[in-house]
Image (spheres, coloured by chain):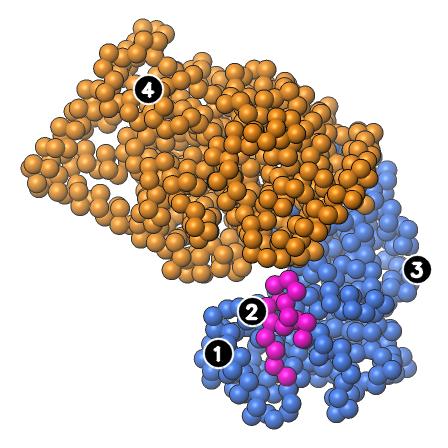
Amino acid sequence: MSKLGRVVEAVERYNGFVEDEVKRARSDKKFGQLMVDRWNEIKAKIPVGTAPTGLKLPRLALPEIDEAGDITRYLLGDGLPGEFPFLNGAYREMYLEPLSQPPVETGAYEKNGHGGKAKLNGSKNGAKPQVTEEPTRLFSGLMLAEDTNERFHFLGAHQRSKRLSTAFDGPTLYGIDSDAPGILGKIGEGGVAVDTVEDMVRLYDGFDLGSPDFSASMTISGPAPIIMAMYIAAAKRRFGNGIVPKLRGTIQADIFKEVQAQNETIFPVEASLRFLTDMMEFTTREMPRWYPVSISGYHIGEAGSTPVQQAAYTLSNGFAYAEMMAARGLDVNDFGPRLSFFLDCGLDVEYIALTRVSRRIWAIGMRDAFGAGPKAQMFKVHTQTSGRSLVAAEFKNNLTRTAAELMLSYMNGTNSCHSNSADEPFTTPSEEWIRLAAHGQAILLDESGIFKHTMNMLSGSPGMKAVERAVEAAILEEFREIERLGGVMGAVENRYQRSQIQTAAHRYEQQIYNGTRPIIALNKYRNDSEEMPEFELARTPRTKQQLQVDRLKKFKAKNARKAEQALAKLAAVVETDENCFPALLEAAEVCSLGQISDCLQEVVGRFRPMV
Amino acid sequence: MAAPIRVLTAVPICDGHDSAINTINLEFIRHGIEVVYLGYHRYAQDIVRAAIQEDVRAVGISSYNGGHVEFFAEVVKQLKKCGADDIKVFGGGGGTITHDDQRVMQKRGVDKIFFAGTSLTDMTQWVRDRYGKASKRGAGKSAEMKLARKLTEIEDGYANGKRPKKSAATKTKKSPGTRVIGFTGPGGAGKTTLIDELILRLLHREPKARIAILSHDPSVVGEGALLGDRATMINSQDDRVFMRSMATRGQAGGLSPATEDCLRLLAQSGFDYVIIETVGTGQEAMPFQSKLVDQTVLVMNPDYGARLQLQKIVMLDLADIVVVNKSDQDRARTAASEIERRLEQNNRGQRLLSTVAKRHRDPGVDKLCNLLTQDLAPAAKKGGKK
């Protein structure tokens, strides 16, 4: 049995345990009274805040129950925000605005630490409440490093904290150099072109990479260990070797979802996983503030999976990574808190509770199947609204779609969020629509009173409960099927996840075309006289593409001899069982991305696509 | 009955968005189109080579990652350069391709761009109308293209119910030095991966060798077929490899009605190796009746079930080489020893090998390559070697 089978058992056992305790609270008077007393104590300690209208509200809303069994079911089955099994939130206060005056009595209420709007890259657990980062993190990347750098500064101008999220162009995602034949038109399209450590220096120029307010997120998986090495090399160039332990950020590095959905894999799966584990081992030991993998359901969702498939495959991939790292001899309490997640949020009904349920399953699985402590039980998640749900027809409707998805994301207690721009179906978003997307988040969180006064504002409705139960059962059923196929790796080799996702995608398209899935202005209330809007498109001019090629050629000429040595060393280490990340770090100083990818492929082979 | 329309579909280089194309492929094959699917992240050069070898009527490209104006134009340009401008190029990219882009692309020779919101039905209908008509096509500029067009002639001849007359050429023997190797075995045993790994080694060991592959996939009810072997054969996208994908077009047993004639043509065309792969076959199948085939390889999966099942597999008596692939699986050792005993009963000097084709530089595949390249024993020699 793989660990996934044990996770299924753990969740079933935990659910049984909760029901047993409910019975006990009802039959055993003493225990029942204990639970009621605890409930009353919790309620008594909830601070009260004031809305701008003067209305007084508790900062945590609890169900109106007073019977010992119901209380037990709530406290154990759902948990308070910030408490196991974390159904209602990873942190106690999440998006609440700070109290202007500290409450007189804090007591146990404060112990769990502040909500941490942006604890994804957050401060130490149990630290004093502080002015936290905004949960807004917008994805961006275009043309050359200096162009994206300019965009980063534009986006950052609106925020206290600098949380950059980097999109790379196609050649970079596939580990191909910009000077490779046949790819000129792809340079800087859909993301930024990065070939060398020098590009990496330009990309984050002007940002203090070691600052506690700065974090960089890099969305790349196939060649992730190489890009990680380049980021470290660039940071060292600018700030010296002492910068390494201070670096904060996330690299996606999720090979499983690439093979299952997104198709940006360049090495065979086993070799990719080895490089990944080498990198994770390094960051776990040397870069305690770094998130070395962002376990991503987003691309699974975007490839057309159902919401349940998305959550099931993402969670099971996460458990598989945890199993790999544990097999390396790393302590779950060291690497567990450095695993983070990335989910898609669309408009299907499951999204009312998908993240909540995921958080609960992760916590129980990590605690009971991996022996993880509290920090390693927490499912910390970045959500992006669904790009797939946006359509070109009457595209301004996309603002409404994204707003509804944002609402669902925050109802689920996401730790950070990206809201898509309405012009996404056409192009890399333009500044006008990015601004609207970012403001959408601010309107929900800062302007509206929905999320800033009271935790649990929308949690626990009967409908939400019904969705939670159905979704949890369906996720466990998927886990069982994956387990039957030999765990995540076995299922991948049987192309189980791929074929499930493709079937779901095809059904979705058919539903659109036969009208059973209404998409406004596309198959319902369609306006056939609409002209397609003309955008100023973010296309990379040929001169820029040529500039990138010229710069790369110069870099290669300058470093030719050193590169040869570094690559020979790297190849030799990869042939052994040693951790190859240190050799990769050396190579990243003098070699291009493509040179390193080619060198590694020479040793381990190329990825054979699955159809 | 008219011959099915053959189109090639692919996603451009540095683009992994295959969700749309997968859906479109399914829709095409359900409406009688034979789709040669090349996969995602494909160079223009690979698309053009495949389009010519497969002799499709049109190439459909699905692009979501930008750079489409250049990419589509490059495919058109290269087709034209090869004298294959009667192979048309169409495609789409949701909202990423604008009307302005479309105008530029059509000016550069792209036949049609579908925009977001086009129904699958409309798209399929358009493709059938546009590329379904019989039209006068040239014989081809290069030798490769001529060969491809002759193969089409043979295949379509069978589809139209007229078995082509045996010409003098079809009766002649194969080219001197050509070795024909047949691969068969159950679905999921890894035949395609094994062949592709073999190609990698052949290209490396014999720097001048030219190889032809005749690959088969089943037709689905309603005539269409998804011919997807090329998508996973990363090493076979090479100018020294001529690959042709065929649908079985209703014939049972793992091959197409036109296979024998197509194989004969390939065997006469000066290749060093001609490799023929059947669709996944059952226990009773004996696909290679042809005298053209020099060696047959049966590729097995370790989990064929109980030992008794082995007695029923007819090909175990006929194959020259039996390969137990996926030999990293738990059951592989048992499987190998059970098959070994089974082959001993035959007492024909059949060879048994264990491979893990998916593993880079697998020594088992090296051994298979040795067996397939060494001189044939006189008894097995049918074609004559240089």
Asked whether the beta carbons under mark 4 and mark 1 sit within 8 Å of each other, the answer is no
Chain B in the picture: what colour?
blue
How far separated are the C-alphas under marks 2 and 3? 43 Å
Query: Relative to A595, does residue B251 appear above or below in the rendering?
Result: below
Kind of element beneath mark 1:
helix
Kindly identify the amino acid type of the residue bearing the numbered disc 1: Thr
Look at mark 1 in the image and give the residue it sits on. Answer: B334
Q: Is residue A304 magenta?
A: no
Which quarter of the rendering shows the C terminus of chain A?
A: bottom right
Question: Observer-nearest residue: A226 or B146?
Answer: A226
Q: Is residue B103 visible?
A: no
In front: A455, or B114? A455
Q: Amino acid at mark 3?
A: Lys
Taking A11 as reference, is B134 above or below it?
below
Residue where numbered disc 2 is placed: B326
Q: Single out the mark in the foreground, 4 or 3.
A: 4
- Secondary element under disc 4, as helix, strand or loop, is loop
Please check whether the numbered discs 2 and 1 fall on a single chain: yes
The image quadrant that residue A572 belongs to is bottom right
According to the picture, the residue beneath numbered tag 3 turns out to be: B141
In the figure, the shade used to draw chain A is: orange
